[in-house]
Image (spheres, coloured by chain):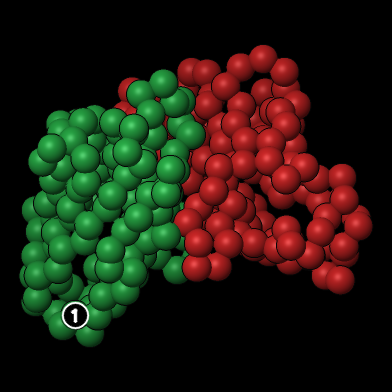
């Protein structure tokens, strides 16, 4: 068990560019979550997958955001036409189907939009 | 709608003294409550949870939390603080239907040597 990994760890991009982040969950976990965390705030839920199905999406997930988990393993989060307000830490977490709220978080991808 | 509140942005305590980090909740139905800790450059780590049963729950690293239904609180405690406990602590509630954690704004705990 190597834990949840996220790549890249840091991303600096110019406003208007597209970015894609990857999350590799713990291998036996079938649930995967994306959160966003800004400075001084707790993480905010973005979306949730069970296997390859995206079952929940937050209102925070505008139409510029898209997430996929094509084979029920790794997941990608893409942001199109980035804006400065997208600058944040993007966290991925995974959990087993028997877990009630206990989620394992990756180290996050810090996005800076200039 | 579920929410948790952490009224203190910062808590300072001397090493060896007991510590308390406060959390209050507002949830419909039975609350599922959690504490997570965030160290610099590391991911959030689960500390403990309350689902049902005993109001005093024990977790990792000697931490415990007391669930108080009448005060809608779930305060994190440790009898004797260590410098290494210095970190950012988050209280969270879990929505079973939406399968998401709702976090408080966090409390920075600093344990002074």
Q: Which structural element holds mark 1?
A: strand
Question: What residue is drawn where x is 58% and y is 62%?
Answer: B39
Observer able to see residue A54: no
Residue B107, by quadrant, is bottom right
Subunit bearing disc 1: A
Nearer to me, A105 or B98? A105
Observer able to see residue A65: yes
Question: Is residue B68 found left or right of A69 in the rendered image?
Answer: right
Residue B91, by quadrant, is top right
Question: What residue is drawn where x is 15% and y is 31%?
Answer: A53
**Residue occupying the far top of the picture:** B53
Quarter that holds the N terminus of chain B: top left
Question: Is residue A98 found left or right of A75 in the rendered image?
Answer: right
Q: What colour denotes chain B?
A: red
| Image position of B85 with respect to B28: above or below | below
Question: What residue is drawn where x is 28% and y is 49%?
Answer: A24
**Residue occupying the far right of the picture:** B16
Question: What residue is drawn where x is 27% and y is 68%?
Answer: A8
For label 1, the crowd category at 10 Å Cα-Cα, with few meaning under 14, some 14 to 19 and many 20 or more, is some
Residue linked to disc 1: A13
Residue A94 at x, y = what percent? Answer: 36, 40
Residue B93 at x, y = what percent? Answer: 50, 35
């Amino acid at each position: 068990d190597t834990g949840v990994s996220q790549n890249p760890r840091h991303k600096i991009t110019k406003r208007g560019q597209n970015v894609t982040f990857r999350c590799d969950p713990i291998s036996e976990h079938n649930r995967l979550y994306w959160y966003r965390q800004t400075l001084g705030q707790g993480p905010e839920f973005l979306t949730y997958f069970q296997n390859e199905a995206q079952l929940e999406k937050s209102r925070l997930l505008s139409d510029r955001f898209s997430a996929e988990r094509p084979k029920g393993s790794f997941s990608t989060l893409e942001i199109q036409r980035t804006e400065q307000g997208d600058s944040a830490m993007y966290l991925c977490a995974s959990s087993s189907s028997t877990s009630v709220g206990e989620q394992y978080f990756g180290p996050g991808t810090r996005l800076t939009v200039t | 709608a579920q929410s948790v509140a952490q009224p203190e942005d910062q808590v300072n305590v001397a090493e060896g003294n007991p510590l308390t980090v406060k959390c209050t909740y507002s949830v419909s139905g039975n609350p599922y409550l959690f504490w997570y800790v965030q160290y610099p450059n590391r991911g959030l780590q689960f500390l403990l949870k309350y689902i049902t049963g005993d109001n005093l729950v024990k977790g990792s690293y000697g931490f415990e939390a007391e669930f108080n239904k009448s005060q809608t609180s779930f305060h994190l405690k440790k009898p004797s603080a260590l410098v290494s406990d210095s970190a950012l602590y988050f209280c969270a509630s879990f929505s079973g239907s939406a399968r998401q954690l709702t976090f408080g704004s966090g409390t920075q705990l600093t344990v002074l040597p």
